[in-house]
Amino acid sequence: MPTNTKLFDEHPEGSPAVINEFMIQDVSGWVLRIGVAVSVAVMILGLTLSFVRHPPTVKAMESTHFKASPAVIWHGVMHGHGMEIIELGIVLLVLTPIMRVAMSVVLFAFYDHDWIYTLVTLGVLLLTLAALLFLR
């Protein structure tokens, strides 16, 4: 059994290929962390505004539904409606992994210059966006 502890046999440890891989993983991790933190903060703000301005009743909670229209959500956010701010937080949470894939496309293309990974990741991004926009 070989005792080679290098990450990649063809690249010595500390080479640009290894450093680039770790940098791409770090950036992807930070995009996910920041996206989740921002979306949770937005949802907590919306929840707080909902309870302060319009205390919910059981009947209102049973009849409330997700509006799904960006224009309706944005209009409610601009007017400080708590429910629409919560919905904005949910939209941000859904967009977080999509932003991670978009960031990976940029990093593979401009930082790592790995065109095969760039094309594959771009394909994943386009399929994800198509599914999000057209399959309702």
Image: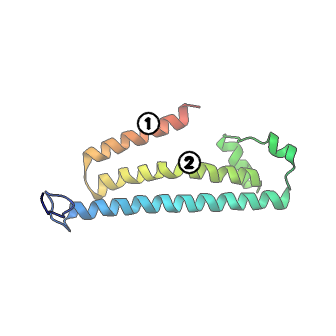
Residue at 76% across, 62% down: 48
Horizontal side of 85 relative to 18 (left or right) equals right
Residue under numbered circle 1: 127
Q: CA distance from mark 2 to mark 1?
A: 15 Å
Give the residue type at disc 2.
Val
Residue 94: numbered disc: 2
Which of the two residues, 111 or 89, is positioned nearer the viewer here? 89
Q: Quadrant of the C terminus?
A: top right
Q: Looking at the image, which residue is at 43% across and 36% down?
A: 127
**Is 1 rendered above or below residue 94?**
below
Few, some or many residues within 10 Å of mark 1 (<14, 14–19, 20+): few
* Residue type, label 1: Leu
Residue drawn where x is 25% and y is 50% of the image: 114
Nearest the viewer among 69 and 58 is 58
Q: Give the image quarter of residue 65.
A: top right
Question: Which image quarter holds the N terminus?
Answer: bottom left
Q: How many marks?
A: 2
Q: Position of residue 67 (x, y in %)?
A: 71, 41
